[in-house]
Image (cartoon, grey):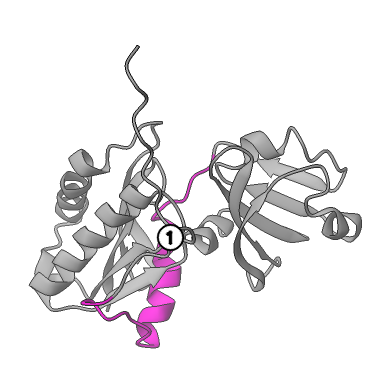
Amino acid sequence: MAYILSIETATTNCSVSLSKNGETLYLKEDYGNGYSHAEKLHAYIHDVLDAEKIKPEHLSAIAVSKGPGSYTGLRIGVSAAKGLCYALNIPLISVSTLEALAHQVKNSKGLIIPMLDARRMEVYSAIYDSKFKEVRKIDAEIIDEASFADLLNSNIITFIGSGVEKTKEIITHKNAFFVENKLPSSNEMSALAFKKYKKSNTEDVAYFEPFYLKDFVALKPKPKV
């Protein structure tokens, strides 16, 4: 019996779930527009465990969304996950943020492109088939009218994630379908984390770092007028 606590903080959704053998038992998340992870994450962890009457020492592993996504959000989630793993002496499992997001698409007959909003017209995306097998690795790209054109000519494509809002205004192909108002959630991490747990596919807690995809750039504050 494996109890796994999953943490998702790659976007504005602060999400924590508890699963048993890959099935989500309890989920708590904040689908708001602001980054509230620093204030809410540890309280959510406590609430999720308390709701199922599970003590921290009963956990088999901690799973964390590894990115890409918000630099600060990922740091908060990974730091919390590492701290729990150190304290409890249990393994750390990382789950691709975009892979978990893709699993929110049900009954797809074509390709799935999960995408997260980046700066301006850029998105972080990957491509999966209807069985969630990776077709193209994660990449950062600028969206324009020609984006995914070759694939759209021969496939139905379902786009999902925070990058959909700006993408749907530019990609108007008849084979493009958009799932709106969806963010990565720890709910879909449950099955993916358990699959890795059974294979002992875990991370080195001391050296694991989130997958930022791009280097963090600190913006200078605007001068006061």
Residue drawn at 38 percent across, 75 percent down: 194
Residue beneath disc 1: 212
Q: What element carries label 1?
A: loop
Can residue 77 be found in the magenta stretch? Answer: no
- In x, y percent, where is residue 192? 45, 70
Q: Is residue 186 above or below residue 160?
A: below
- In x, y percent, where is residue 203? 31, 79
Q: Which span is picked out in magenta?
A: 182-207
Task: Name which quarter of the figure residue 40 lies in.
Answer: top left
Residue drawn at 17 percent across, 49 percent down: 42
Q: Is residue 159 left or right of residue 196?
A: right
- In x, y percent, where is residue 48? 22, 51
SS majority, magenta? loop
Can residue 183 be found in the magenta stretch? Answer: yes
Q: Is residue 180 above or below residue 112?
A: above
Residue sitting farthest toward the top? 225
Q: Residues within 10 Å of mark 1 (few under 14, many from 20)?
A: some
Q: Quadrant of the C terminus?
A: top left
Residue sitting farthest toward the bottom? 199
Q: Is residue 61 left or right of residue 31?
A: left
Residue drawn at 35 percent across, 32 percent down: 34
Is residue 127 visible from the viewing direction of this image? yes
